[in-house]
Image (tube, rainbow, N blue to C red):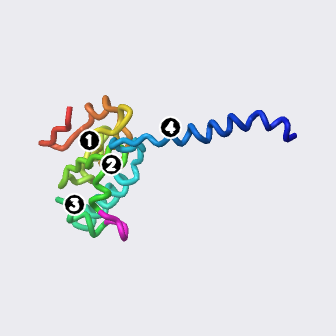
Amino acid sequence: MMAQLAPLRPVVWLLLLVLPALGGCSSDAPVQTQDSGPLRELAQAYVEATHALQRAPSSADELKPYLAAGKNVEELLTSPTDGKPYVVVWGVDPRTGMDLKPLVIGYEQQGANGSRFVFTAMGVMLMTNEDFKEAKFPAGHSPPP
C-alpha cells in the first residue's frame, strides 16, 4: 500500500508549496461576497422604526434604537459586496410603496457581477442592473446611471 502512495508525495509537496502562494495575493478591492445580511438587518430595523414612530425614519440616528443589540449602524450601512455605503432614501414609508413594482428604499451603490441587493417596500431582493434601471424610486430620487 505504501509503495502505491510514494509517487504521489512529490505532487502533494508541490501543491502544499504552490497553493498558499496563489491564495496570498492581496488587493484593496472589497471581497465580492454577495451577502444581503446587513441590508436585511437594516431593512428590518427601518420597518420596525416606521411602525414605532408612525412614520419612516429620517436618519441613521433614528434607526439606532431599532437595531439588534450590539449592532453598529455604521457597519450595517456598508455593503460587504462592494465595500461602499448603501444608499438609503430616508423618510420613505415602506407601508405605502407596496405595488407590483415595489418602491425602492435602499440599495447597493455598485453590487457585483451585474446585480445588486435592493431594499424595497416588499423586502430585500437581488436585482440585475437592468431591473434596477427599471425599478420604481421615490419622487425626487435619481439612482446612478
Measured Cα–Cα span from mark 3 to mark 2: 15 Å
Measured Cα–Cα span from mark 1 to mark 3: 17 Å
- Circles 3 and 2, Cβ within 8 Å, touching? The answer is no
- Circles 4 and 1, Cβ within 8 Å, touching? The answer is no
Q: Which residue is mark 4?
A: 22
Measured Cα–Cα span from mark 2 to mark 4: 26 Å
Q: Is residue 40 left or right of residue 107?
A: right
Mark in front: 4 vs 1: 4
Q: Earlier in the sequence, mark 1 or mark 3?
A: 3
Q: At 37% from the left edge and 67% from the top edge, which residue is drawn?
A: 68
Q: At 31% from the left edge and 58% from the top edge, which residue is drawn?
A: 75
Task: Say which mark, if any, is on residue 109.
Answer: 1
Mark 3, Cα crowd under 10 Å, few <14 / some 14-19 / many 20+, is some
Magenta span covers which residues?
A: 67-72
Q: Earlier in the sequence, mark 4 or mark 1?
A: 4
Task: Say which mark, if any, is on residue 79.
Answer: 2
